[in-house]
Structure formats: C-alpha cells, structure tokens
Amino acid sequence: MIPDTWPQSLAGGALIGLSAALFLSLDGRIAGVSGIVSGALRRLDENLLRNLAFVAGLMLGPILYRVAFGGWPLVRIEGSLGVLALAGLLVGFGTRLGSGCTSGHGVCGLARFSPRSLVAVVSFLAAGIATVAIMNALGVA
Amino acid sequence: MSVIFRTLSALVCGAIFGFGLSLSGMLDPTRVRGFLDIFGAFDPSLAFVLAGAVLVSTLGTLFARRMRRPVLDVAFHLPKKTVIDRPLILGSAIFGIGWGMGGFCPGPAVASLSLGVVPIFVFTAMMLVGMLLHDNFFEKRGLVLRRDADAQV
C-alpha cells in the first residue's frame, strides 16, 4: 500500500517546508506559489523582481535534481490536452479567488494554524477527491 | 544592495522548493491523482510530503514569531484576513476540481516547465489565463467579493 519511495517523499516535503521557513524568516512572506506567480504577472512594483526570482528558482529545481541524480523526475501525464487546459483554467481562477493553493494554504497556512487555510485545504481536498472519483466512474481521462 | 539580497533569497527559496518537489515525486500528476483516488488505486505519497513540509514549516513559523522583523525586510507581510467567507470556500473548491482533473497544482506546474513537455505548457498557460481573468476582470469589476490585498498565499 505504501510506496517504497516514501522516504524521498518525506525528505522532499521537508525541503519544501525548509523553503517556506526560509522565505518567511528572510523575506517575511508566505511561500505561496499561486500568489507569487500572479504577482509576477501583473504587479510592476518592488515585489516583481522577488516573485520572478522565486519562479525562476522553482524551474531550476528539476534541473538541480537532474544534475544530482542524472535524470529528470518522473512525470506521467494521462489527461488529454482539452482536460488539462480546462484544469489549468480552474486552478488559476480558483487559487486566486480562494487566496491560495497547496503551498500557501497547505504548507504555510497549516503551519501558521490559520483557520482560513484549514477550511481551504479541506475544501480543495474534498473537491479533488470527488472530481477523481467522478472521472473514474464516467471513464474520463 | 538589499534588493540584490532579497532577489537572491527568493531565487534560493524557489530552488529549494522546486528541488523538494522533484525529490518528493509530486511533479508526477499521476501520483498526485493517485492520492486523491481514495476509492481506487490510492497512493499515500502526498501525505508524506505534506507531513514533512508542514512539520518543518511549523518549526520555521515558531522561529519567525520570535523575530522582531524578517532578516531582509522591515516588517512581516502576512495575510491579515481571518473571516471564513464564500470566496475562500468556493475558490478552493474550484481549484480542487482543476487539481483533480489534471493532477497539477501551481507549484509543480511551474517547476516542471523545465522538462519542456507540451501538455505542461498548455496547463500552465491556461492557469495564467485563469489568474489574469480573476485579477483583471472579475476582481476589478467587483464580481467577486474582495480578497485580502496582502494575502500572498
């Protein structure tokens, strides 16, 4: 039941937590990817450079992984382009309306004992579980 | 000078985040969807990732609370909103539907752009469209209730 890659998952998670801890104590900000990405899109202010740098760093991550382990991390995409396009639209709109995603509400919000983030996490987990169950029942991929 | 340090700090934090995502297996949408598939081929990996992340992040938060200000700024910039409202619940649910459909959330989508795979470009491009649609159309015209302006989450 539990994949034998669980130590990598735990260690990778700890690094994500370390990134959030560093960003908070150095920059005084929440390492929420949806907020940072949308900030890099529109705000022409002092935060733009910081947001762009964080996004560049994120993209550097898999490259560092490749340097360290000699291959790209595994990415298996099963969904059709149409499903992925609609999914992307919903993720973009939803994370902005809901003020955060898995990183901002999940990793950072839960660590701050934020009731808003707990509600958000329960909401997106429930919706995600229901969506996968419905797609499986209908045979959509 | 401080701008250079702040930019460098964001770059390093982003890189640690992206490397952690890669190591954790969370760049793989099939694995992420496996976590959400609790009635089928359930894969608990994401629970290990979240546990490790929240544990270290909580220690960092407790540490930061003892600081008068962050190292590279004059004050902390944290969300001030505490009310649990409809945009929070509805927005998170809409995000959850997209997450379940594609198996990508914003962090892994942006990080895995480096792999140069077309479907990831399509997903991320549409994600940016969704964000711009919200920020520039719905929010500006007051079609959604106002969010916390400070919430970088």
Image: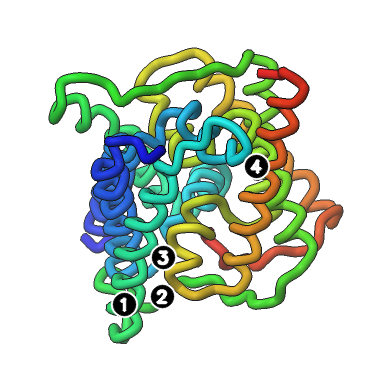
Chain under label 1? Answer: B
Q: Secondary structure at mark 1?
A: helix
Chain under label 3? Answer: A
Residue A23 x/y as whole percent: 32, 61
Query: What residue is shown with label 4?
Result: A128
Binning the other alpha carbons within 10 Å of mark 1 as few (below 14), some (14 to 19) or many (20 upward) gives: many
Where A97 sits versus A130, above or below?
A: below
Which mark, residue B64?
1
Binning the other alpha carbons within 10 Å of mark 4 as few (below 14), some (14 to 19) or many (20 upward) gives: many
Which mark, residue A29?
3
Q: Give the Cα separation between the discs numbered 3 and 1.
A: 11 Å
Residue B48 x/y as whole percent: 37, 50
Q: Amino acid at mark 3?
A: Arg
Q: Secondary structure at mark 2?
A: loop
Please check whether the numbered discs 4 and 3 fall on a single chain.
yes
The mark closer to the camera, 3 or 1, is 1
Q: Give the Cα separation between the discs numbered 2 and 3.
A: 6 Å
- Tell me the residue at 75%/32% (across/down): A134
Tell me whether the residue at label 1 lies in contact with that at label 4, contact meaning CB atoms closer than 8 angstroms.
no
Q: Amino acid at mark 2?
A: Phe
Query: What residue is shown with label 2?
Result: B76
- Tell me the residue at 64%/77% (across/down): B82
Q: Give the Cα separation between the discs numbered 2 and 4.
A: 32 Å
Q: Secondary structure at mark 4?
A: helix
The mark closer to the camera, 2 or 1, is 1
